Image: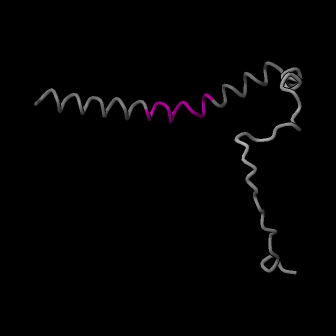
Amino acid sequence: MNKKNSKKPKITYIDDGRTIADMSNLPPRVQWAKKGTSSSFKEIWRTYWQATKMMLKPTLIAVGFLIIVYLIVTIIFWLM
């Protein structure tokens, strides 16, 4: 059978009137926190700085744009 011809089963949602999702199958949050990470401090630090370096240029561009807009608006209102 072709992938184009195969139909996906239609999902039917039934509203039972509850306002929150059923989370009874999730393990307690305490167990998640106790597991922690298997990464070393050096790996975590390297990942942090790589992400920071990636976002530095776009952040400086955005801040520069806001400063330019602020200066333009200030000059316009100062001249009035």
Q: Position of residue 69 (x, y in %)?
A: 31, 34
Q: Measuring 60% from the left and 29% from the top, which residue is drawn there?
A: 53
Find residue 33 and report its image quarter.
Answer: top right
Q: Specify the segment rendered in magenta.
A: 52-62
Relative to 37, residue 22 above or below: below
Relative to 67, residue 7 above or below: below
Foreground of the two, 11 or 50: 11
Foreground of the two, 66 or 33: 33
Find residue 44 and report its image quarter.
Answer: top right
Q: Position of residue 56 (x, y in %)?
A: 54, 30
Q: Measuring 37% from the left and 32% from the top, which residue is drawn there?
A: 66
Foreground of the two, 50 or 12: 12
Q: Measuring 44% from the left and 35% from the top, which residue is drawn there?
A: 61
Relative to 31, residue 18 above or below: below
Q: Position of residue 35 (x, y in %)?
A: 89, 24
Residue 54 highlighted magenta (yes or no): yes
Residue at the extreme front of the image, as rendered: 17
Residue at the extreme left of the image, as rendered: 80
Q: Quadrant of the C terminus?
A: top left
Instruction: Say whether residue 45 is visible.
Output: yes
Q: Quadrant of the N terminus?
A: bottom right
Instruction: Say whether residue 39 is visible.
Output: no
The color scheme shown is: one colour
Q: Main secondary structure of the magenta part?
A: helix
Relative to 3, residue 19 above or below: above
Foreground of the two, 30 or 58: 30
